[in-house]
């Protein structure tokens, strides 16, 4: 079968683009060591309660306007819940799941993370505006999924 000349040219271009993008992705992954941002820190989901960090979930002040929230997510709650922090604080959320995939979304902000068992998820946000921020799970996680919410009060 003889292909028309133009079709041959476009075939070579499209295969070329495909190969080039695979070479670039391969170079980034293997030569530069680029990986997705999450999933680098792992944890045994069966032993979250014995973990050096997650054995004591809570809100910890780490600087003048800096806080750390060590949080576990489980069906169907956030621990700790009903967090209070002063306005102007920068908060690093350090999270893991004890059972299955949950979501961590803070309404009215850009914070939207997936929290998976076996992985440690971190996300940082600065809360300038006082108010009550709704936190919801946005990954379907079972019969009580729609009740999985809490609040962050900034004052
Ligand atoms: Cu947790 Cu949906």
Image (cartoon, rainbow, N blue to C red):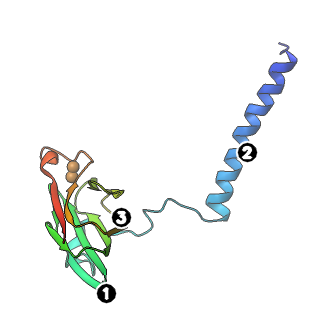
What is the distance, in whole Å, between disc 2 and disc 3 at their CAs?
32 Å
Point 76% across, 38% down: residue: 16
Q: Position of residue 94 (x, y in %)?
A: 31, 71
Task: Using the rendered view, name the quadrant where residue 133 is placed.
Answer: bottom left
List the residue tagged with mark 2: 20
Point 31% across, 87% down: residue: 64
Sequence order check, earlier mark of 3 and 1: 1
List the residue tagged with mark 3: 119
Sequence order check, earlier mark of 2 and 3: 2
Q: Position of residue 46 (x, y in %)?
A: 24, 66
Q: Secondary structure at mark 3?
A: loop
List the residue tagged with mark 1: 64
Image side of residue 84 versus residue 43, left or right: left
What is the distance, in whole Å, between disc 3 and disc 1 at their CAs?
29 Å
Q: Is residue 56 above or below residue 1?
A: below
Task: Using the rendered view, name the quadrant where residue 59 is placed.
Answer: bottom left
Within 8 Å: ligand 1 and the Cβ of disc 2? no
Residue furthest top in the image = 1
Residue furthest front in the image = 129
Image side of residue 91 versus residue 147, left or right: right
What is the distance, in whole Å, between disc 2 and disc 1 at their CAs?
49 Å
């Amino acid at each position: 079968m003889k292909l028309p000349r133009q079709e041959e040219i476009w075939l070579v271009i499209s295969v070329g683009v495909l190969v080039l993008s695979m070479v670039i992705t391969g170079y980034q992954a293997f030569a530069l060591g680029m990986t997705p941002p999450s999933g680098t820190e792992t944890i045994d989901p069966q032993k979250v309660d014995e973990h050096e960090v997650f054995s004591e979930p809570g809100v910890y002040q780490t600087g003048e306007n800096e806080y750390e929230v060590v949080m576990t997510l489980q069906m169907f709650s956030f621990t700790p819940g009903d967090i209070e922090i002063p306005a102007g604080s920068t908060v690093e959320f350090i999270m893991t799941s004890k059972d299955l995939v949950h979501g961590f979304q803070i309404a009215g902000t850009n914070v939207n993370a997936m929290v998976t068992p076996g992985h440690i998820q971190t996300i940082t946000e600065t809360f300038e505006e006082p108010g009550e921020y709704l936190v919801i799970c946005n990954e379907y996680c079972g019969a009580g999924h729609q009740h999985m919410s809490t609040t962050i009060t900034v004052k």
